[in-house]
Image (tube, rainbow, N blue to C red):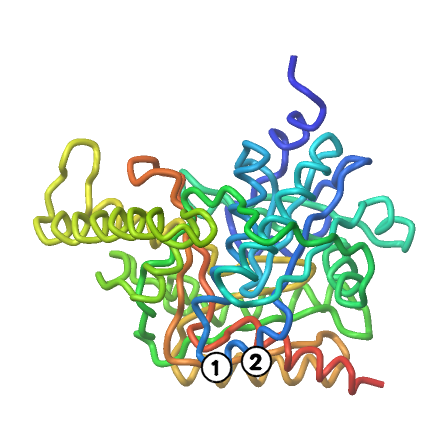
């Protein structure tokens, strides 16, 4: 017999068109007893200033990988935020999620040299404060869908965590989460239209829901003038190329704490896979069940380059004219009190992945701006909110 939690997940509404994501009537509230597991890198801006873009994104994606692997399921709603993530957790698995999240904190501190702040926030606390967590899914491809969130609960929970509420304690030094499938091998992906732009837009002080929905639709339409929504990954997939830091981080994530032998073994395994994939891409022919051409195309179609998390978040590749229009519309909406926004321009996009198996079709790819995208946009957003009357 299917459990109520599984029934809820099975029956979540599915968006086929991103333009619909700002309509709150199309979402379903999380069941009573659930919680949000969330985390972010403390001083991610400082790490980004030091050029540690990959490390910050790896820590954020590691939150998703570590928790989902520990719970033994990949159907839970989650959202990647660049320097962190949030995951909706059923009541029976909250303690297991807490333990996994504490181990992710330990791994980030030990291996990446960053500090991860993490919290478990009950949905009941969110509702006690007049907000909610409502969920739907956006079908990114035939094989992958990503959760969208509305109701204001995620944003409130994140602010509470940053103020020191609901925090969890980091696991002991050397504790390790299961990060199977976590990967960040791809090189930065250069803009083809001119600018990779990371945008965050939240409802403004006017609290005009209809006007905010219209702004979201306009920004999405402007990004979509190229017919692909401003997708920063080419339709045929990213150009082949793997970054040294990504390979090192991936090998370290698979290894025991300070175990030189396992680090060398996993490093060799990651390098072998990298070389093998390069050869298969060069041959452009299927080998067994692996089709390199279809896989690269699936990498593009399976990305989360745009999402709704109590507001619009997107990293898009646009030309100068579209960027000018997007800025103008956001600036006007901010003056009218319809939205708060942050926007950061860069020349590249970064991709961090969760790939259960190269032979499976449900590999997930998280896209951020290549020079701090969402984290820098969030900083500008907070400055704007702080200066608002």
Q: Are marks 1 and 2 in contact (CB under 8 Å)?
A: yes
Q: Disc number at residue 243?
A: none
Q: Is residue 290 left or right of residue 136?
A: left
- Quadrant for the N terminus in the image: top right
Image x and y of residue 67, in percent: 58, 43
Image x and y of residue 149, in percent: 66, 51
Mark 2, secondary structure of its residue: helix
Query: On the image, numbered disc 2 is attached to which residue?
Result: 46
Figure quadrant of residue 42: bottom right
Q: Tell me the residue at 38%/44% (across/down).
A: 355
Q: Disc number at residue 50?
A: 1
Q: Tell me the residue at 72%/24% (across/down).
A: 4
- Near mark 2 (Cα within 10 A), the count class, few <14, some 14-19 or many ≥20, is few
Q: Is residue 378 left or right of residue 176?
A: right
Which one is nearer the viewer's eye here, 271 or 37? 271
Image x and y of residue 245, in percent: 35, 66
Q: Tell me the residue at 34%/35% (across/down).
A: 360
Against 9, residue 299 (above or below) is below
């Amino acid at each position: 017999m299917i459990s109520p939690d599984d029934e809820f997940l099975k029956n979540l509404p599915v968006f086929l068109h991103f333009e619909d994501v700002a309509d709150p009537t199309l979402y379903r509230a999380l069941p009573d007893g659930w919680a949000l597991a969330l985390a972010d890198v403390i001083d991610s801006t400082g790490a980004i200033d030091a050029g540690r873009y990959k490390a910050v994104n790896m820590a954020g994606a590691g939150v998703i990988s570590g928790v989902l692997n520990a719970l033994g399921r990949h159907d839970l709603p989650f959202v990647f935020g660049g320097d962190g993530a949030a995951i909706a957790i059923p009541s029976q698995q909250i303690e297991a999620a807490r333990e996994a999240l504490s181990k992710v904190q330990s791994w980030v501190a030990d291996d990446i040299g960053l500090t991860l702040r993490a919290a478990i926030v009950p949905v009941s606390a969110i509702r006690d404060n007049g907000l909610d967590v409502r969920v739907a899914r956006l079908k990114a491809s035939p094989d992958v869908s990503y959760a969208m969130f509305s109701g204001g609960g995620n944003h409130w929970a994140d602010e509470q965590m940053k103020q020191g509420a609901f925090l969890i304690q980091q696991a002991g030094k050397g504790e390790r989460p299961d990060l199977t499938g976590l990967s960040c091998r791809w090189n930065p992906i250069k803009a083809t239209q001119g600018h990779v732009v990371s945008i965050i837009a939240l409802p403004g002080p006017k609290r005009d829901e209809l006007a905010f929905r219209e702004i979201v639709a306009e920004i999405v339409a402007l990004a979509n003038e190229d017919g692909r929504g401003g997708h920063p990954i080419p339709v045929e997939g990213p150009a082949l190329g793997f970054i040294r830091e990504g390979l090192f981080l991936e090998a370290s994530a698979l290894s025991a704490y300070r175990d030189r032998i396992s680090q060398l073994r996993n490093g060799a395994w990651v390098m072998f896979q990298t070389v093998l994939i390069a050869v298969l891409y060069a041959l452009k022919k299927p080998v067994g069940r692996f089709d390199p051409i279809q896989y690269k195309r699936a990498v593009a179609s399976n990305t989360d380059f745009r999402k709704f998390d109590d507001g619009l978040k997107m990293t898009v590749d646009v030309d100068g004219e579209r960027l000018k229009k997007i800025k103008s519309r956001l600036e006007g909406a901010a003056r009218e009190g319809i939205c708060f926004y942050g926007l950061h321009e860069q020349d590249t996009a970064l991709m961090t992945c969760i790939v259960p198996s190269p032979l499976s079709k449900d590999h997930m790819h998280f896209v951020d701006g290549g020079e701090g995208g969402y984290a820098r946009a969030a900083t500008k957003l907070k400055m704007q909110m702080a200066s608002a009357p």
